[in-house]
Amino acid sequence: AQSVTQLDSQVPVFEEAPVELRCNYSSSVSVYLFWYVQYPNQGLQLLLKYLSGSTLVKGINGFEAEFNKSQTSFHLRKPSVHISDTAEYFCAVSFQGAQKLVFGQGTRLTINP
Amino acid sequence: KAGVTQTPRYLIKTRGQQVTLSCSPISGHRSVSWYQQTPGQGLQFLFEYFSETQRNKGNFPGRFSGRQFSNSRSEMNVSTLELGDSALYLCASSFEGAGNTIYFGEGSWLTVV
């Protein structure tokens, strides 16, 4: 079975500091990887996705993620965060051919001024 | 281009009642899926429909059902509501094809009392 683990449930950082949100997955088959963001009382918005090719993926709002196949990880990073980045972030996987996402438990990112 | 639209946004139901939630996908999207989000269980896949046929199903009891119409609009129904069914129900749509971005609506907040 496939699963996704987000290693931190909450991450507090200061404004303009760098941040890394960690995600590991388990799968016996090739997967596609996604990061979604959820602002309060809203649905999910796609930040970025990895399908194939370059392991460094750039997304919206200055976020990027790196796929590491040997470590089965897909960590999300941003070099300098802003107050507006306060939200919950979800890592997800899908399997080739399936329009279905398996999500991690989410990481709540809190930005302190 | 309009996004995924869900109605109603908020509703309160009594235990034992049933509820129907509606979803209009992005124009041209034929795959529609539903997810349940709760604080305890996180984001869980309910089912996915494509061309009026259920293609994938999550691990939920038979009280949870859905359908898709010829115009790709979808409804999900929960019968004999339980307190534990209180959740945010998210609808998502995508083009057919592995790895295609899955777009989410803002969700329907269901409270069962």
Image: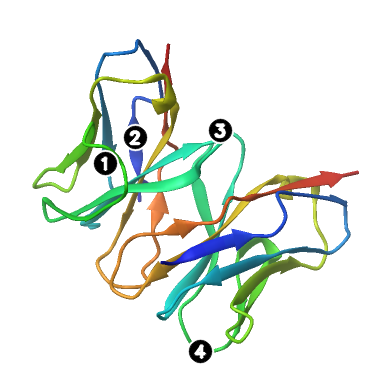
Label 3, label 2: how far apart the Cα atoms are: 13 Å
Q: Amino acid at mark 1?
A: Ser
Question: Circle 2 sits in a helix, a strand or a loop, which is it?
Answer: strand
Mark 4 touching mark 1, by CB under 8 A? no
Q: Which residue corresponds to mark 4? A: A53
Mark 4 or mark 3: name the one nearer the start of the chain: 3
Residue B18: image location, x then y, percent: 24, 19
Q: Could you tell me which residue is drawn at 81 percent across and 68 percent down? A: A79
Q: Mark 2 — on which chain does it sit?
A: B
Q: Which residue corresponds to mark 1? A: B24
**B68 lies left or right of A45:** left
Label 1, label 2: how far apart the Cα atoms are: 6 Å
Question: Circle 4 sits in a helix, a strand or a loop, which is it?
Answer: loop
Are callouts 1 and 3 both on one chain? no
Q: Amino acid at mark 3?
A: Asn
Which residue is outermost to the left?
A: B70
Question: Circle 3 sits in a helix, a strand or a loop, which is it?
Answer: loop
Q: Amino acid at mark 2?
A: Gln
**Count the marks: how many?**
4
Q: Which residue corresponds to mark 2? A: B6
Question: Circle 1 sits in a helix, a strand or a loop, which is it?
Answer: strand
Q: Could you tell me which residue is drawn at 61 percent across and 36 percent down? A: A40
Residue B110 - label: none
